[in-house]
């Protein structure tokens, strides 16, 4: 991580330049800066860093175009600053984000400095589906000429296509090759007779597992004997299954180190896929379904295998909890955001392991047309179960598939509104899990009369509560009028003369609605209420004997 002293030195050098350029931008942003505009600048500066062959580009807030240091209050607080990385990464096509975000004092004023990495070779960086560039110091759409210059660059090297020089057919498992032949015929039934006539070398070449008879990393991963896995450079080519109880204590585990085409069956056989019974609204008869759909768990595990960054030396992990399955693999999520994958419903244009993906498609292990993730979401929708969670932080992809109804209110919405689109359901799912959604998404749901509330505390609308029989829940979620809480604080101070912050918390926290789902969020709400009363001149606080007390201001 770059220190403040180093950043100050970098900023000193940047400000000695005659003016801003394609890879250096200054903005005043005294109080705020639009996050969508920040994303556009990220795209533009990232693309220009690639084209200008520099290690990074810089965006600085708190300094005017004439280089006057004015200071910025944008995103005060380290947690908010670091949260920008995920916010931008969720909306870029290849999920790259700021390399660093730092706020520090420069000439007596707070400035915010963003270090922006260059676009990935061969892939222009887009933000919310659009690519941006620079015309001198102006933000513009990326020109066709610049776009083609990036697209013509050699793309990410394909680890899975590398040749294992000392390997031969003897390092592959005969049962795994037989399984591969069966899967290939399932995928290509019209070629069944022809496949029988191929020897192993021909078959593996045709299936894109080997290259001109030479053993690839893909061949070792999918068909290699356990002892041949040591021939893979840097990779820890194993799958670890862990069974945990509700307290996250480990009950059992299994480490799969054989050919992945066979080990997938061994790992999936460990799952205790119990029946789940629940009562649909409007019927007296319960539905009975498997907790997990067979397609969903296979697709999730195969995706982890296909998109793992094996060069990082990390195992694929598969954790089974009482009500969910969690799949983890190393490497960034190259398509960008899950929302974008589902919206496009098409194969990705960027692959980390292209040969491995092609081979797994030929062997009927992954979806052919790139709609596997969307199908998992559709399956959960039909069962009224929560949508899968995708955690894409820290150069790791973690996918959680739920095996039961977690929120009856959300399930009732799905049951009573079959015309909801998958995109609408995904947004409502985030609301039900108290996850943040964008202002645009909230405005859309509010226009559809699906939610109410203020960011980030949204809840089911009155119309939906009436429709799904959640009127009591609506009242609890909506909470009491703010005036009630303000009057309660003033009344308590009038009666008791003074109260500590802890006593004010005790007075208010228990009365706040359920969507404040943590004590920290409730304390922050109390802090806002106290701040509003203080700003109005009604109350004040005093420090005495090492403690602070609130009182009525005379």
Image: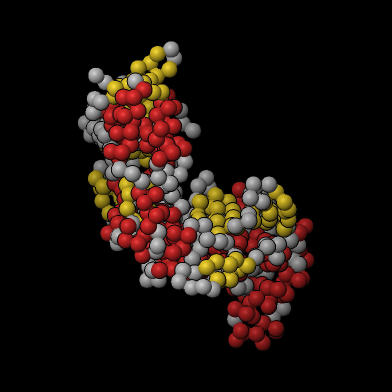
Furthest-front residue in this view: 495
**Quadrant where the C terminus lies?**
top left
Q: Residue 187 appears at what percent x and percent y?
A: 60, 78
According to the image, what is the colour scheme of the structure?
secondary structure
At x 65%, y 85%, the residue is: 192
Residue nearest the viewer, comparing 366 with 74: 74
Please determine whether, in this image, residue 283 is positioned above or below residue 319. below
Q: Is residue 342 left or right of residue 65?
A: right
Please determine whether, in this image, residue 348 is positioned above or below residue 142. below
At x 26%, y 34%, the residue is: 31
Q: How many marks?
A: 0
Place residue 198 in its image quadrant. Answer: bottom right
Q: Residue 301 appears at what percent x and percent y?
A: 61, 62
At x 44%, y 54%, the residue is: 432
At x 45%, y 44%, the residue is: 517
Furthest-top residue in this view: 545
Residue nearest the viewer, comparing 255 with 107: 255
User: From where the camera sits, is residue 100 visible?
Assistant: no
Q: Is residue 162 left or right of residue 512?
A: right
Q: Residue 547 appears at what percent x and percent y?
A: 43, 17
Q: Is residue 453 left or right of residue 214?
A: left
Q: Residue 223 appears at what percent x and percent y?
A: 70, 66
Residue nearest the viewer, comparing 236 with 255: 255
User: From where the camera sits, is residue 200 visible?
Assistant: yes
């Amino acid at each position: 991580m770059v220190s403040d002293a180093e950043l100050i030195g970098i900023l000193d050098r940047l400000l000695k330049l005659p003016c801003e350029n394609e890879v250096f931008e200054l903005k005043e942003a005294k109080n705020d800066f639009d996050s969508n505009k920040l994303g556009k600048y990220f795209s533009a500066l990232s693309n220009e860093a690639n084209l200008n062959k520099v290690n990074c580009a810089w965006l600085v807030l708190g300094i005017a175009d004439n280089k006057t240091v004015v200071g910025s209050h944008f995103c005060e607080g380290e947690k908010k600053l670091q949260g920008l990385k995920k916010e931008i990464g969720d909306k870029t096509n290849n999920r790259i984000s700021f390399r660093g975000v730092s706020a520090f004092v420069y000439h007596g004023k707070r400035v915010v400095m963003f270090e922006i990495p260059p676009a990935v070779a061969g892939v222009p960086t887009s933000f919310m589906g659009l690519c941006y560039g620079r015309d001198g110091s102006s933000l513009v759409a990326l020109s066709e000429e610049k776009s083609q210059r990036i697209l013509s660059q050699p793309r990410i090297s394909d680890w899975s296509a590398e040749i294992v020089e000392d390997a031969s057919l003897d390092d592959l498992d005969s049962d795994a090759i037989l399984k591969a032949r069966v899967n290939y015929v399932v995928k290509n039934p019209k070629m069944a007779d022809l496949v029988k006539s191929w020897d192993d070398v021909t078959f593996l070449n045709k299936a894109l597992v080997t290259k001109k008879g030479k053993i690839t990393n893909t061949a070792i991963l999918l068909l290699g004997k356990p002892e041949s896995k040591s021939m893979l450079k840097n990779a820890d080519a194993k799958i670890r299954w862990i069974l945990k109880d509700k307290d996250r204590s480990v009950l059992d585990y299994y480490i799969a180190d054989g050919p992945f085409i066979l080990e997938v069956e061994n790992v999936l056989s460990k799952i205790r896929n119990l029946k789940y019974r629940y009562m649909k609204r409007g019927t007296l008869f319960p539905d009975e379904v498997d907790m997990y759909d067979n397609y969903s768990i296979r697709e999730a595990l195969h995706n982890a295998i296909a998109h793992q960054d094996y060069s990082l030396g990390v195992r694929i992990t598969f954790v089974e909890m009482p009500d969910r399955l969690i799949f983890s693999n190393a490497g960034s999520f190259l398509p960008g955001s899950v929302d974008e994958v589902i919206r496009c419903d098409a194969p990705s244009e960027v692959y980390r392991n292209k040969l491995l993906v092609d081979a797994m498609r030929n062997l009927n292990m992954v979806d052919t047309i790139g709609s596997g993730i969307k199908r998992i979401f559709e399956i959960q929708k039909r069962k009224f179960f929560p949508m899968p969670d995708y955690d894409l932080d820290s150069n790791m992809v973690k996918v959680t598939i739920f095996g039961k109804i977690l929120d009856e209110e959300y399930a009732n919405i799905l049951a009573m509104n079959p015309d909801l689109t998958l995109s609408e359901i995904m947004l409502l799912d985030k609301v039900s899990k108290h996850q943040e959604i964008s202002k645009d998404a909230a405005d859309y749901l509010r226009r559809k009369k699906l939610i109410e509330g203020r960011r980030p505390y949204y809840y089911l609308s009155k119309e939906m509560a009436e429709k799904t029989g959640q009127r009591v829940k609506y009242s609890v979620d909506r909470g009491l009028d703010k005036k009630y809480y303000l009057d309660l604080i003033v009344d308590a101070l009038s009666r008791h003369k003074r109260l500590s912050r802890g006593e004010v918390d005790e007075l208010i926290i228990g009365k706040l609605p359920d969507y404040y789902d943590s004590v920290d969020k409730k304390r922050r709400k109390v802090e806002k209420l106290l701040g509003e009363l203080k700003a109005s001149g009604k109350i004040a606080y005093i420090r005495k004997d090492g403690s602070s007390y609130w009182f009525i201001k005379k």
